[in-house]
Image (cartoon, grey):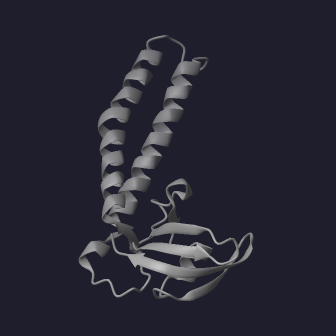
Amino acid sequence: MSNKEPITVEGLKKLSEELVFLKEKKRPEIVNAISEARSHGDLKENAEYHAAKEQQSLNEGRIQEVEDTIARANVIDVTKLENNGKVIFGATVSLQDLDSNEKIKYKLVGKDEADIKKKFIFYQSPIGKGLIGKNNGDLVEINTPSGKKNFEIIKVDYV
């Protein structure tokens, strides 16, 4: 997996903070839990020991995942780019749903940053793909899992 993954400045910062937490706080806690459980005797029937080892495995796996993502990160800071109204990775796009008349705002981000509750959508998702490369004022028809959606791009921000 040597291909670069686009990531926003905020996304890289969050991953770096998570890595520090996993290595400096969670890892020592798990090591302590394992040694505590070991002191209880027979490891074959020691549920605490097995649970702590499982936690260790999950934590180490996540550390590797985060380190890999950081190593492959292609940080894109849209605030340093000239805003010409084109939808690009990292842009925040204000849309008008032409079917429901609802206004929606999405930020196009990498897969590790995507969070629909925050309206951060993966740039490779159906909506993300449908918006990339379009311009302010464009009408767009996007095939989503719930059917065709029609939007007008109201505003493109590089924030």
The residue located at (50%, 31%) in the rendering is 53
Q: Is residue 96 above or below residue 117?
A: below
| Quarter occupied by residue 107 | bottom left
Name, please, the residue furthest toward the left.
80
Residue 88 location in percent, x, y? 42, 80
Residue 140 location in percent, x, y? 60, 85
- Where does the C terminus fall, quadrant-wise? bottom left
Q: Is residue 54 above or below residue 19?
A: above
Q: Nearer the viewer, residue 121 or 136?
A: 136
Q: Is residue 151 left or right of residue 86?
A: right
Q: Is residue 12 above or below residue 48?
A: below
Name, please, the residue furthest toward the front.
101
Q: Is residue 41 above or below residue 86?
A: above
Q: Is residue 152 left or right of residue 7?
A: right
| Quarter occupied by residue 1 | bottom left
Q: Nearer the viewer, residue 2 or 158?
A: 158
Q: Nearer the viewer, residue 28 or 100?
A: 100
Residue 58 location in percent, x, y? 50, 41
The residue located at (32%, 83%) in the rendering is 83
The residue located at (30%, 44%) in the rendering is 20
The residue located at (45%, 48%) in the rendering is 62
Asked if residue 139 can be seen in this view, the reply is yes
